[in-house]
Image (spheres, rainbow, N blue to C red):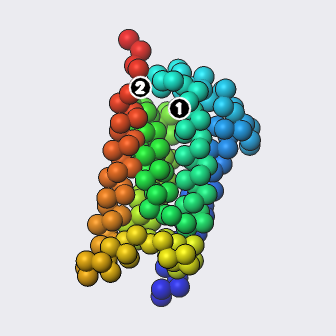
Amino acid sequence: MESGIDAGLLILRVVVGGVMMFHGTQKLLGWWGGEGLNGTAAFFDRQGFRPPKVMAAIAGCIETIGGALFGAGLFVSIAAVLLVSTLVNVVILHARNGLDRKKNGFEYELVLLAAVAGIALTGPGAYALDPLFRVDVAKYFTHLVGVDTSIAWGAIMILAGAAGGIVVASTRRRKA
């Protein structure tokens, strides 16, 4: 049973990490038909993010690096904070449009957010680099305090990411 769970976690991590890297490289490099940094900065400017080019570069780097780490299962706690932050910001950006993707809603980002949050709570699984390099922070704290802290650690990572996304969203200049 464990190997099935680990295989499922691997599939989720690789697909979500790959999708996030895809979006990040579209923003940064214009790959896969993306607008590149200048086009993304123009979009960020229209959405009220300041300074738009810096914010576009940060978003692209977070999505690319966070996606790569998440997919590889390396420093998953850090990757989860980065990706949750980005996805919460995007959900907030699209919230006024409702859930429906056809109306520029946030259904797609919500599914990615749920997958990242789920992995943050469960851990990356056995088929990840975290266990190989022994960088599982939740296990370290569990050993230190003698109580399983993995769910608490995952919840802290989700809340930290959500707080970051809310802070970024709250700094947008809204048009009158």
SS under mark 2? loop
Neighbor class of circle 2 (other Cα within 10 Å; few <14, some 14-19, many 20+) is some
Name, please, the residue furthest toward the bottom: 1
Name, please, the residue furthest toward the top: 176
Q: Which mark is residue 69?
A: none
Q: Which mark is residue 55?
A: 1
**For residue 37, what is the image quadrant?**
top right
Quadrant showing the C terminus: top left
**Against 141, is 24 above or below?**
above
Residue 99 falls left or right of residue 8: left
At a point 30% along the width and 78% down the height, the residue shown is 144
- Residue 76 in view of the camera: yes
**Of marks 1 and 2, which one's residue comes earlier in the chain?**
1
Which residue is disc 2 drawn over? 172
Residue type at the position of mark 1: Met
At a point 41% along the width and 25% down the height, the residue shown is 172
Neighbor class of circle 1 (other Cα within 10 Å; few <14, some 14-19, many 20+) is some
Relative to the observer, which residue lies in front, 60 or 105?
Answer: 60
Residue 146 image offset from top left, x and y in percent: 26, 82
**Against 160, is 137 above or below?**
below
At a point 66% along the width and 27% down the height, the residue shown is 39
- Residue 95 in view of the camera: no
At a point 50% along the width and 76% down the height, the residue shown is 134
Residue 145 image offset from top left, x and y in percent: 25, 77
Residue 100 image offset from top left, x and y in percent: 46, 40
Residue type at the position of mark 2: Arg
Nearest to viewer (mark 1 / mark 2): 1
**Against 109, is 43 above or below?**
above
